[in-house]
Amino acid sequence: MTGMEYMLSEVMEPHLFVIRKQKRDSAEKVTPMLAYYILDGSIYQAPQLCNVFAARVGGKEAINIKEVKRVDHILASLQRKLPPAPLPPPFPDGFVPPSTAEAEKDPENQQTAEPQPSAVDPIIDQGPAKRMKF
């Protein structure tokens, strides 16, 4: 099956749904095109990553080399005056870190008591986009 496809990729009921528009070339090959998110009943198109970088980098002022040298000098003097960081504590006697082969073979013995935090896109986490007034 080939063509354009919309897929529900993230769900945080009842407030947030993320939908991904993708081009399917074959059963295995998928090219992501755009992302949309529905936040409290309003539909937004997620910005592309290149546009986010361009907006954040383009909005910054020119770098003043004198200021960079001044900050570098301050940090260097602090490093000379501060004592070195203490060494990390050693592992307890008899501790052997689990090998990756054993972890893949026996997933039931792994600790699953701690829930993993869900990965939230920082752009989506900022809330709805502000509309420009003309």
Image: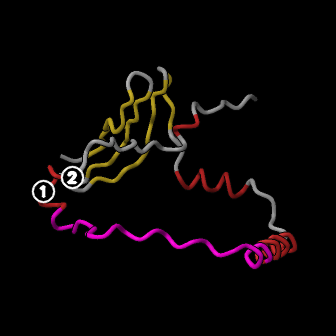
Q: Which mark is residue 84?
A: none
Colour pattern? secondary structure
Locate residue 115, reporting x and y percent: 33, 41
Along the horizontal axis of the image, is 13 left or right of 89?
left
Local crowd size for mark 2, using a 10 Å CA cut-off: few (<14), some (14–19), many (≥20): few
**Observer-nearest residue: 37 or 114?**
114
Along the horizontal axis of the image, is 123 left or right of 111?
right
34 to 84, vertically: above or below? above
**Observer-nearest residue: 89 or 49?**
89
Q: Quadrant of residue 17?
A: top left
Tell me the amino acid under the disc marked 2: Gln
Task: List the single residue furthest toward the left.
Answer: 105
Q: Which mark is residue 106?
A: 1
Local crowd size for mark 1, using a 10 Å CA cut-off: few (<14), some (14–19), many (≥20): few
Q: Residue at x 67, y 53 (%)?
A: 56
Q: Which quarter shows the C terminus?
A: top right
What residue would you read off at disc 2? Answer: 110
Q: Residue at x 38, y 24 (%)?
A: 13
Locate residue 36, reporting x and y percent: 45, 36
Q: Residue at x 58, y 30 (%)?
A: 128
38 to 107, vertically: above or below? above
Tell me the amino acid under the disc marked 1: Asp
Is 80 included in the stretch rendered in magenta?
yes
Q: Quadrant of residue 112?
A: top left
Stretch in magenta: 77-102
